[in-house]
Amino acid sequence: MNESKNLINGTKLRDNLSILSNELGLKKWDFGASISNDVSVQIDKGNPKQLKASQKSSITIRVWNDNKIGITSTSDLSKIGLKKALNSALEASYFGNTNETPDFSIAAKDELPKLERPLRKAYGVKKLMSDLIHAEEALLNKDKSIKSVPYNGFAESISERVYINSDGALRHIQSTQASLYLYARAEEPGRKPRSSGSIKVGYGAEDININECINEAASRTISHLYYKPIKTGKYLVCFKPEAFLDLITAFSNIYNARAIIDGISLSKKDSIGRKISNEILSMNDDGLHQSNFGACTFDGEGTPTQNIPIIEAGILRNFIHSEATARYFDTRPTGHGGIGSKASVSPDWPVVFKANGQTAKYPELNFKESNEEFVLVENLHALHAGIKASQGSFSLPFDGWLVKNKNKISIESATIAGDFINLLNNIIQVERNQQFTHQGVSPHIWVNELAITGDK
Amino acid sequence: MTTARLSQDFLEPHYIDDLFKKNLEELISYGISAGANFVEIFVENIESVGLLAEQDTLTSVNPSIGKGVGIRVFLGQRDGFVSTNDLSKQGLRFALDQALGMLGLDKSTQSILNFDGLSTLKDYGASKSNYLIDCPTLKESTSKLLEATHLLKKSGPHVNVRRGSYSKTTQEVVVASSDGTYCRDLRLYQSIGLNVLALDKEHRSSIGRRIGTEGKPSTLIDWDIEKAAIEINASAEKMLYAKYVDAGQMPVVLANKFGGVIFHEACGHLLETTQIERGTSPFANKLNEKIAHSEVTAVDEGLTDGAFGSIAIDDEGMETQKTTLIENGILKRFLCDRAGEIRTGHKRTGSGRRQSYAFAAASRMRNTYIEKGEYTPEQLIESIDNGIYCKSMGGGSVGATGQFNFSVEEGYLIKKGKLAEPVKGATLIGEAVEVMPRISMCANDLDLAAGFCGSVSGNINVTVGQPHIKVDSITIGGR
């Protein structure tokens, strides 16, 4: 990886597209392109298992033809590839949706926010491999019950994105990123094997705290080794930050303008200003938050990334928008659009926090200190299967503990179920301390009376 | 595919000729002379189009074009894999050097192996060159899809959101490797989905159905949209007022077709050598032992005509086959790819599959199903006093230690041997080793359903299937 040189020649791409689109009589076009170089290693019992690298490029071109839009994606950035893609986009434009034609974002030429993030030098495959071998060995030595680390990986990448349109907008960003995951398997005679792990992300491999990852993976795995079934019933539940972020992201249709227009949201067009949660909860979507190592200063339509308040003291304050949804709602795009003939809208980086000036129903609850009996939910699984986002319901397997008088007993196998809006309204405590995770920021969140199905 | 050379790329997948073969041989020779035990080159050329119709409007037409190469090099049990869509000589040489370098090999390494060149091309795609001509045009496709969403409105009194989607992908692959393998295939995948969201005051239900085929250009034209619309609306209507199911342990009957996802997730993945290598399968040391009820015989194959998971060759160039996994409850075979064979000693089963050139192949399922039994579906229902009938399954997954879960999209209570009121919110939870012996009855109505499976080598097309089956006891997660 060479962090000093651009991977994409944006100017050349723009000039090529200008010439080719002129030949086809297309005056208005835009495109998003990306290139990335990735390296990753996996090991097995001290030996390298699979070592991977990839060089990937892709471009998505949109053309406007008599107020109808056509689109094509291609991995071929050569002149021949671009010509083929333009022709394909032109053909697609004849089927464009005249009821909703995306346009250039009104913010595509606005000044971008400053984002000073380091570009890290690559470790290279040998260093990644030797560090991972040492990490595996250290994790296996943490406890005699840990027999293997079946899922592991150390990866680094450099990537570049551009957005360019025929109106003169030109966006460019380059970034580096690295990740380490260790997922251990522990076994004890006469008991079921148990697994858990840890993921760490950074700008480069040098930023990854390998020891912290090892210690977390070991402690989490061991903490699940001695398990008991849980009795089916309603419980006081504390969600760890990762688990709560999983849920709120899965139900992001609540604040997604695209989902609202499409009729698959739990919110309606007039839901802004309505109470959707207990007043103790606030949440922003802040793609440029310091904990977001993959931050990008613009979205797929070139709109600058912004910090958008979503929930303020339980009140829904804003939806997230693309150019087209913002026009529909008569507001400005928020930097959450993708590039498409029907531009998608996606959340960026949820930041959950305790609302200023609000007092929780049970402010004394604390996941480390409380003596109450409660279920501490560590991870939720199978979100793709157990979330009914358009209905607002969930039924999900989870890893966690039954905690009483500060004693934690791992739960053998169980699911947690409920309605998401009810859950938001039944929040009885939002702890003060936020944790930075690889999927957002949140403190521990307490909810009363959630249904848990166990084996008893 | 076109017949004129389009670019100066070293490996131009549009034009497979002597030069193309010579260039492949040059790369493989280079890898072998650097000391690799085995070199494989996977060349892919892909074109697809996705359509989305919402309510009565076509809201998205998404074509995409791509090509790329995956290079895999083995040294003993280790392998290095590099993918690139830089198909120039310089780009491919860089990728190969990178793969060799991962294994500590370079041009100066002494080789003890020879590469004798590639065999004559086995062209499994030669008879399929009319695929694109025989498929409906974009105009015909959009019309059919809009007709389908319109019919959804006609037959659904409470339907609020109607969606129809269609995707067509043609994938041309060439596999060349240092054991002489040299083959080409052309694959045509089509997938059609219908989704509705029904709404009545505070009541909501959402139902989705999907069909998928391989190698059937007329799929979209042959699709019975009226029948599909009536079925999906009937399900949505029944589930609209369903109550949440009570949690607990109880017997269940799982319907045929997509009910087979339970076997796919709960057991099938654990029979892939990818899992055996990791030591994460509870069945690793159970070959020729009883792991399921004697009613259960299960297979994985790539042969069923038109099925979504059918393949002429796998992505490592091996011809497909029918693999009996479990016979009358006895574990007979694992699904094995090349890396699995090298690392576990099990023989390859033509199961090396990958989403695209960007993934190394891994042992994956194709069309996987439990064989039919001797009972009627009604006999299964009648045998239960108090349980659940899972008519339609949502998705599911299996954890690192074999725990599985599946959501039930459309479920009904069984009371005293008869179907009763609909219930929602049910999740089936368990572990394969515990549930497989509890499949006590298999009906005589085996049928298959298309799906997508995500795992180590990406998202691939598969078929799941089974007859109606009865599981004596399983945990139902609910409220």
Image (tube, grey):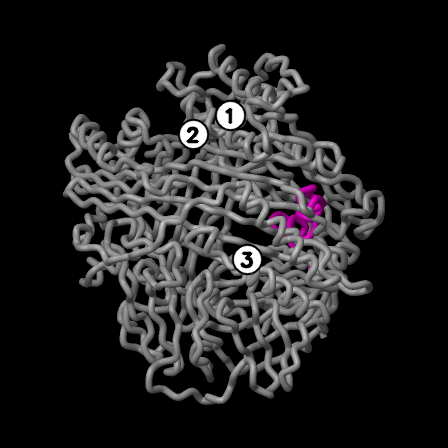
Which mark, by number, is residue B186? 1
User: Considering depth in this image, is A11 or B410 the residue closer to the camera?
Assistant: A11
- The residue labelled by disc 2 is B67
Residue drawn at point x = 72 percent, y = 45 percent: B276
A449 versus A304 height, above or below = below
Chain letter of disc 2 in the image: B
Q: Quadrant of the N terminus of chain B?
A: top left
Identify the residue at the far front of this view.
B108
Tell me the mark number nearer the camera, choosing from 2 and 3: 3
Secondary structure, magenta segment, majority class: helix
B81 versus A245 height, above or below = above
**Residue B38 screen position, x and y as percent:** 63, 26
Q: Is residue A449 visible?
A: yes
Tell me the mark number nearer the camera, choosing from 2 and 1: 2
Query: Which segment is the magenta one?
Result: B253-277
Which mark, by number, is residue A210? 3
Labelled pair 2, 3 in contact (Cβ < 8 Å): no
Q: Is residue B343 left or right of residue B193?
A: right
Which mark, by number, is residue B103? none
Residue drawn at point x = 49 percent, y = 41 percent: A124
The amino acid type of the residue labelled 2 equals: Lys
Chain letter of disc 3 in the image: A
| Marks 1/3: CA–CA distance | 45 Å
Q: Secondary structure at mark 1?
A: strand
Few, some or many residues within 10 Å of mark 3 (<14, 14–19, 20+):
many
